[in-house]
Protein backbone atom coordinates (compact mmCIF):
# COMPACT_ATOMS: atom_id res chain seq x y z
CA UNK A 1 0.00 0.00 0.00
CA UNK A 2 0.97 3.59 -0.60
CA UNK A 3 0.01 6.57 1.52
CA UNK A 4 0.09 10.15 0.25
CA UNK A 5 -0.23 13.15 2.54
CA UNK A 6 -0.56 16.65 1.10
CA UNK A 7 0.18 19.91 2.87
CA UNK A 8 0.62 23.57 2.05
CA UNK A 9 -2.82 24.64 0.90
CA UNK A 10 -4.56 27.72 2.20
CA UNK A 11 -6.05 31.10 1.40
CA UNK A 12 -4.05 33.57 -0.67
CA UNK A 13 -4.76 36.76 -2.57
CA UNK A 14 -4.59 36.86 -6.34
CA UNK A 15 -1.00 37.25 -7.47
CA UNK A 16 0.32 35.41 -4.44
CA UNK A 17 2.17 32.14 -4.12
CA UNK A 18 1.76 28.80 -2.38
CA UNK A 19 3.87 25.67 -2.26
CA UNK A 20 2.18 22.30 -1.98
CA UNK A 21 3.98 19.23 -0.71
CA UNK A 22 3.05 15.55 -0.90
CA UNK A 23 4.85 13.01 1.25
CA UNK A 24 4.64 9.45 -0.02
CA UNK A 25 5.21 6.37 2.11
CA UNK A 26 4.73 2.64 1.88
CA UNK A 27 5.62 0.34 -1.01
CA UNK A 28 7.07 2.78 -3.50
CA UNK A 29 9.02 1.52 -6.46
CA UNK A 30 11.30 3.32 -8.87
CA UNK A 31 9.91 4.25 -12.24
CA UNK A 32 6.67 5.68 -10.91
CA UNK A 33 5.04 8.89 -12.05
CA UNK A 34 3.54 11.51 -9.76
CA UNK A 35 1.26 14.41 -10.36
CA UNK A 36 -1.05 17.07 -9.02
CA UNK A 37 -4.71 17.15 -9.92
CA UNK A 38 -7.35 19.65 -8.90
CA UNK A 39 -11.11 19.71 -8.67
CA UNK A 40 -13.18 22.84 -8.39
CA UNK A 41 -16.84 22.75 -7.26
CA UNK A 42 -19.06 21.46 -10.03
CA UNK A 43 -16.14 20.59 -12.27
CA UNK A 44 -14.29 17.42 -13.17
CA UNK A 45 -10.93 16.61 -11.69
CA UNK A 46 -8.14 17.75 -14.02
CA UNK A 47 -4.43 17.11 -14.27
CA UNK A 48 -2.45 20.21 -13.32
CA UNK A 49 1.10 18.90 -13.63
CA UNK A 50 2.91 15.57 -13.77
CA UNK A 51 6.48 14.41 -13.40
CA UNK A 52 8.19 11.11 -14.13
CA UNK A 53 10.83 9.52 -11.94
CA UNK A 54 13.39 10.80 -14.44
CA UNK A 55 12.17 14.38 -14.15
CA UNK A 56 10.12 14.73 -17.32
CA UNK A 57 7.22 17.13 -16.80
CA UNK A 58 4.02 18.26 -18.41
CA UNK A 59 1.56 20.97 -17.42
CA UNK A 60 -1.98 22.09 -17.95
CA UNK A 61 -1.84 24.95 -20.44
CA UNK A 62 -3.42 27.44 -18.06
CA UNK A 63 -0.68 26.98 -15.44
CA UNK A 64 2.36 26.94 -17.71
CA UNK A 65 4.84 29.59 -16.66
CA UNK A 66 3.20 29.99 -13.25
CA UNK A 67 3.42 26.54 -11.63
CA UNK A 68 6.45 24.31 -11.24
CA UNK A 69 6.33 20.65 -10.30
CA UNK A 70 9.34 18.93 -8.75
CA UNK A 71 10.17 15.85 -6.74
CA UNK A 72 12.79 14.63 -4.32
CA UNK A 73 13.12 10.91 -4.98
CA UNK A 74 15.31 10.36 -1.92
CA UNK A 75 12.56 11.77 0.31
CA UNK A 76 9.64 10.42 -1.75
CA UNK A 77 8.21 13.91 -1.77
CA UNK A 78 6.41 15.80 -4.51
CA UNK A 79 6.10 19.57 -4.71
CA UNK A 80 4.07 22.12 -6.60
CA UNK A 81 5.25 25.72 -6.53
CA UNK A 82 2.36 27.94 -7.53
CA UNK A 83 3.06 31.58 -8.40
CA UNK A 84 0.88 34.37 -9.78
CA UNK A 85 -2.19 32.61 -8.47
CA UNK A 86 -5.57 33.48 -9.93
CA UNK A 87 -9.07 33.05 -8.53
CA UNK A 88 -9.70 30.36 -11.13
CA UNK A 89 -6.96 28.27 -9.50
CA UNK A 90 -9.25 27.79 -6.51
CA UNK A 91 -9.84 24.07 -6.03
CA UNK A 92 -8.99 21.05 -3.94
CA UNK A 93 -5.57 19.84 -5.04
CA UNK A 94 -4.81 16.12 -4.95
CA UNK A 95 -1.51 14.33 -5.10
CA UNK A 96 -1.35 11.23 -7.30
CA UNK A 97 1.18 8.44 -7.63
CA UNK A 98 0.97 5.88 -10.40
CA UNK A 99 2.99 2.68 -10.40
CA UNK A 100 2.36 -0.66 -12.09
CA UNK A 101 -0.88 0.74 -13.52
CA UNK A 102 -2.28 1.48 -10.06
CA UNK A 103 -3.28 4.95 -8.93
CA UNK A 104 -2.93 6.21 -5.38
CA UNK A 105 -4.42 9.46 -4.11
CA UNK A 106 -3.96 11.80 -1.21
CA UNK A 107 -6.83 13.26 0.76
CA UNK A 108 -6.57 16.64 -0.94
CA UNK A 109 -5.68 20.13 0.21
CA UNK A 110 -7.81 23.22 -0.35
CA UNK A 111 -6.37 26.16 -2.26
CA UNK A 112 -8.46 29.32 -2.26
CA UNK A 113 -7.42 32.40 -4.20
CA UNK A 114 -9.30 35.60 -3.43
CA UNK A 115 -9.68 38.41 -5.94
Image: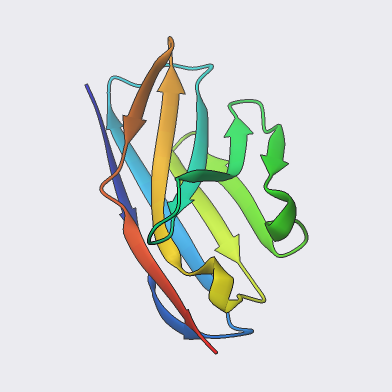
Spot occupied by residue 63 in the image (x, y as percentages of width and height)? 69, 59
Front residue of this view, candidates 9 and 39: 39
Query: Residue 8: in sight, yes or no?
Result: no
Looking at the picture, tell me which residue is in the foreground, 9 or 53: 9
Q: Indicate how the structure is coloured in the image.
A: rainbow
- Quadrant where the N terminus sits is top left
What residue is shown at x 59% (from left), y 38% (from top)? 50
Q: Where is residue 19 in the image (x, y as percent from the top left)?
A: 50, 66
Q: Residue at x 50, y 33 (%)?
A: 34
Indicate left or right for 83 with 29 as reference. right
Q: Is residue 103 above or below residue 61?
A: above
Position of the C terminus by quadrant: bottom right
Residue sitting at the far right: 65
Which residue occupies 59% across, 66% down? 82
> Where residue 22 appears, x then y in whole percent?
39, 48
Nearest to the observer: residue 7 or residue 76: 7
- Examine the rendering and report whether any part of residue 63 can be seen: yes
Residue 59, quarter of picture: top right
Q: Is residue 58 left or right of residue 91?
A: right
Q: Is residue 109 above or below residue 97?
A: below
The picture quadrant where one finds residue 7 is bottom left
Residue 99 point in image, percent of width and height = 43, 17
Amino acid sequence: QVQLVESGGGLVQAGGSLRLSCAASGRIYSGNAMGWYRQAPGKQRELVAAITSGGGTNYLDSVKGRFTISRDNAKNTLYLQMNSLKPEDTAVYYCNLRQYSLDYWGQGTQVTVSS
